[in-house]
Amino acid sequence: MINNNKTLILGWPVKPPQKWLQRYPDIEVARIYRENVNWCEKKFKDLSFHMPKSMQVCDCIKPSTWYGDWKERIKGFDIVILIDEIRGRDVFEYILEKNPQCNLNVFIDSPIKEGSKKEPFLYKDLPVRFFTCDRRIAERYHIEFAPYFYIFSPYDFGEYLNNCWLENNNDVFFVGEEKGDRAQRIAKIKEILAKAGLTHDIHLVPQNRRGKKKAAYMTYGDVIEHVKQSKAILELISDGQTGITQRPYEALFFKKKLITTSAEIKNYDFYCEQNVFVLGEREVAELPEFLNAPFKEIDKEIVDEYTLKSWVERFKK
């Protein structure tokens, strides 16, 4: 229980169902908008995002028509957190109309395009607080920096750590989508690892292309099995991103080494040179010694700061 405050997190992926959320009975997660609408409904749904409020004369072109069933329970929440999915003022106005006393927040976890409806200053007249896990965004828009948390928790970490008998079959593990120049960057990293005499387990998932079926992603259960059997996890930061990804949290919770292309990790309290190798700042020749050195234990109090419970605590007034 989280201090008896009912919390609604909107914009959260709900498929496949995440059973670990049952541990948090005071938190509900949902997508903002209804999914699985037919092609005709989708046309009206998209139209509603661009229709001026004065012209929303019928329900089918009102954004609230397309909200998920969370809108039927919105009055029962003390804290509401929207993750990234901002298309305009409508969802804020709807929530505040139905529940004016709620603590309404937005958490931004991806780059903001200048001129987009995600820019925080557009909503200064509303009682909405903005947070971000990207320090560059926090500085640009003068909003509060708040680290993200380890979003996937399908395992009991205590049980895992006591019963992890799998040997490390690979030195470095990576899984990610093939986007931007990532294929070229991965090729260079493979050369670095080969030069250092290290093995790797790297999975680059092709993006969906017209005329081809969408590539199947590795299930997260499989990802964790690969993590277990590797000494280190590789993190590649996308262009324009300054915040960290979920990879450092996986390394933290599963007590694995981290190899990353981002120096941002050095601003986190769980960073230490024995556990984290920042590419470009240390000699490649140091990698074997880095991977073979024992993992340095991180205080439980620090690790616990990156759980869902601690993350929600940040939004309380």
Image: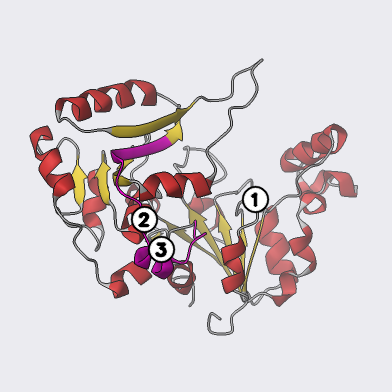
Q: Is residue 143 visible?
A: yes
> x%, y% of residue 242?
33, 44
Q: Which residue is pictured at 26% across the width and 28% down the height?
A: 189
User: Which mark is nearer the camera, 3 or 2?
Assistant: 3
Q: Relative to residue 96, is residue 143 depicted above or below?
A: above
Q: Relative to residue 55, is residue 92 depicted above or below?
A: below
Marks 3 and 2, the one that precedes in the sequence? 3
User: Which mark is nearer the camera, 3 or 1?
Assistant: 3
On residue 16, which mark appears?
A: 1
Side of 260 where 157 appears, left or right: right
Side of 46 where 239 appears, left or right: left
Side of 71 where 170 appears, left or right: left
Chosen colour scheme = secondary structure
**Gap in angstroms between the C-alphas marked 1 and 2:** 21 Å
> x%, y% of residue 158?
40, 70
Tell me the magenta residue range. 152-175
Where residue 196 sits, quadrant-wise, is top left
**Gap in angstroms between the C-alphas marked 3 and 1:** 22 Å
Q: Which residue is pictured at 22% across the width and 45% down the height?
A: 263
Check whether the beta carbons of the residues at disc 3 and disc 1 lie within 8 A of each other: no
Which is more toward the observer, 165 or 186? 165
Q: Is residue 164 magenta?
A: yes
The residue carrying mark 3 is: 160
Which is more toward the observer, 268 or 77? 268
Q: Is residue 273 magenta?
A: no
Badge 3: residue crowd in 10 Å (few <14, some 14–19, many ≥20)? few
Where residue 49 sits, quadrant-wise, is top right
The residue carrying mark 2 is: 249
